[in-house]
Image (tube, rainbow, N blue to C red):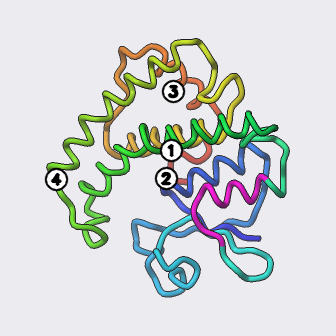
Amino acid sequence: MKLYAGFAPNAFRVLAFMHEKNLDLPIEQIDVLKGEARKEDHLKRNSLGEIPVLELDDGSYLSESIAICRYLESLHPEVPLMGENALNSARIEMWNRRMEQQIMGPYSEVGLHAMPIFADKIEQIPEYAESQRRLTSERWAWFNEEMSDGRAFVAGDTFTVADITGMTALMISGFLDLDVPSDLRHANRWVNAVKARPSWLRYAKPV
């Protein structure tokens, strides 16, 4: 297997996932900012011109970050990041979706509608970007209240893929200069914990 990745949020998700599981796969760097993901050779791997893409041993390709993570988890169940039983897996899935939609979602929309790199991909609406920028503070306030029970990580006391999705939101926030409000004590407790992890230190900035 080989992973096509680079310095981009969803590629970070898979790279952090692999790092947390101590997986070592060959990685081919794709420079998104230089447009390499939209070149013909990569479009053959993923017609959407996005990363990450996992090339399987039979020559086929798997894209979408969580799909890749789920496949890797099935092959390498230790360290478990997507659950150890039915209820635990469902709770992690619930929180992964919440972090994806409630926290990462507004950041992604700001990026899509405000960053020049996406200008040829969608019809950008600056006013919508500003509305989503304002929404990030509300969503972090919600998260702060959720974390006020004192649990260490998003889905409980164990680090999971839901935390990695939250870390991906933090990575995007760095692009946009949209930090977590400093007065949200519980949210920032979590932020400090995940930013201390080796996977963050290794992949949250360009290699």
Q: From what the image shows, is residue 1 above or below residue 155? A: below
Dot 2: element: helix
Q: Residues within 10 Å of mark 3 (few under 14, many from 20)?
A: some
Residue drawn where x is 78% and y is 57% of the image: 24
- Mark 2 and mark 1 lie on one chain; the one further toward the N terminus is 2
Residue 187 x/y as whole percent? 47, 21
Q: Which residue is mark 4?
A: 126
Which of 141/41 is in front? 141
Q: Does the CB distance between marks 2 and 1 fall below 8 Å?
A: yes
Residue 118 x/y as whole percent? 30, 65
Mark closer to the observer (4, 3)? 4
Q: Which residue is mark 3?
A: 191
Q: Is residue 199 visible?
A: no
Q: Which residue is mark 1?
A: 168
Q: Magenta part of the protein: which range?
A: 62-73
Amino acid carrying mark 4 in the image = Pro
Snapshot quadrant of residue 132 = top left
Residue drawn where x is 22% and y is 48% of the image: 129
Residue drawn where x is 46% and y is 75% of the image: 48
How far apart, in angstroms, are the residues tagged by discs 2 and 4? Answer: 21 Å
Q: Which residue is mark 2?
A: 9
- Main SS of the magenta segment? helix
- Mark 2 and mark 3 lie on one chain; the one further toward the N terminus is 2
- Mark 4 and mark 1 lie on one chain; the one further toward the N terminus is 4
Q: Residues within 10 Å of mark 2 (few under 14, many from 20)?
A: many
How far apart, in angstroms, are the residues tagged by discs 4 and 3? Answer: 28 Å
Residue 57 x/y as whole percent? 80, 77
How far apart, in angstroms, are the residues tagged by discs 1 and 3? Answer: 11 Å
